[in-house]
Image (cartoon, rainbow, N blue to C red):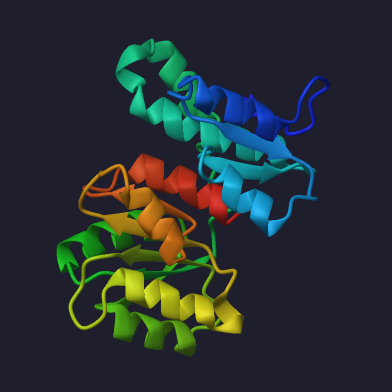
Amino acid sequence: MILDLKLKDMSGMELLNKLKYEDMINFPILIHTENNITQEDEAQLKKYAESIIIKGKSSVTRLLDEANLFFHSVDSKIDKEQIRHIRSTHEKESSLTNKKILIVDDDMRNVFALTSALEEKGISVIVGRNGVEGIKKLQENPDTDLILMDVMMPEMDGYAAMRKIRKEETFKNIPIIAITAKAMKDDREKCIEAGANDYLTKPVDINKLISLLRVWLYK
């Protein structure tokens, strides 16, 4: 569901509360709204919504990218021609070219796979093998555009690293996508609370990752 918070008969928040009360929220929700929500509203909305998109010149494109993430999860139910059409609209990755991404992960096989996929899109990749090294790499590369953060690492895990990064004024708004080994219900909330903007589970679906990058690297 794509929801505008400004409705005629009730607010979007009231509708979400009503749906939750009636136990009817069993589908992805995308919020498409004006740029006038408070931090408190945003925190409340994140309990229900997969993403909050601010209305603007290219917000429709962002909506398509977000919707595409959910289409990937139900590809088996979609006609092949529909899949081809959906994916053809996302072939061009010019928005990713020349971006710099920091991968923080101690699993070198995972790092190699992610690096190969990202470099194919024209992305520059730097790597930290644990939370401590990741923070050091970030400080050495303050022009980093986004962080892919594994949560289970030696020395300093991803949760601690994200909290530390968010305490630094320079990096408080840098997009962070957490990578977890499990898909437990509370994983997303735990990652968000630690400072992540979004999260993926291993093994990482490259198509889903690219769609997420297009969303979070949008400017």
Question: Where on the picture, by quarter, is residue 104?
Answer: bottom left
| Residue 50 falls left or right of residue 157 | right
Nearest the eye: 163 or 215: 163
Of residue 117 and residue 189, the one placed in the foreground of this image is 189
Query: In the image as oriented, which residue stretches furthest toward the front?
Result: 21
Counting from the top left corner in percent of width and height, residue 219 is at: 68, 56
Residue 44 x/y as whole percent: 59, 47
Residue 192: name its quadrant.
Answer: bottom left
Describe residue 56's horizontal placement relative to residue 167 as left or right: right
Is residue 219 visible in the rendered structure shown here?
no
Residue for point 34% across, 76% down:
160
Q: In terms of depth relative to the viewer, which is nearer, 145 or 124?
A: 145
Vertically, is 144 above or below 115? below
Number of callouts:
0
Residue at figure coordinates x 39%, y 47% from the top left: 209
Give the answer, above or below, for where 98 lies relative to 142: above
Residue visible at 55% across and 69% down?
174
Q: Considering only vertical position in the picture, is 97 above or below 164?
A: above
Q: Residue at x 57, y 57 (%)?
A: 217
- Can residue 100 be seen in this snapshot? yes
Instruction: Give residue 66's position: percent from left, percent from top.
Output: 53, 37
Q: Which part of the image, by quadrant, shows the N terminus?
A: top right
In the rendering, at what x and y percent does residue 54 appear?
72, 45
Q: Is residue 102 left or right of residue 182?
A: right
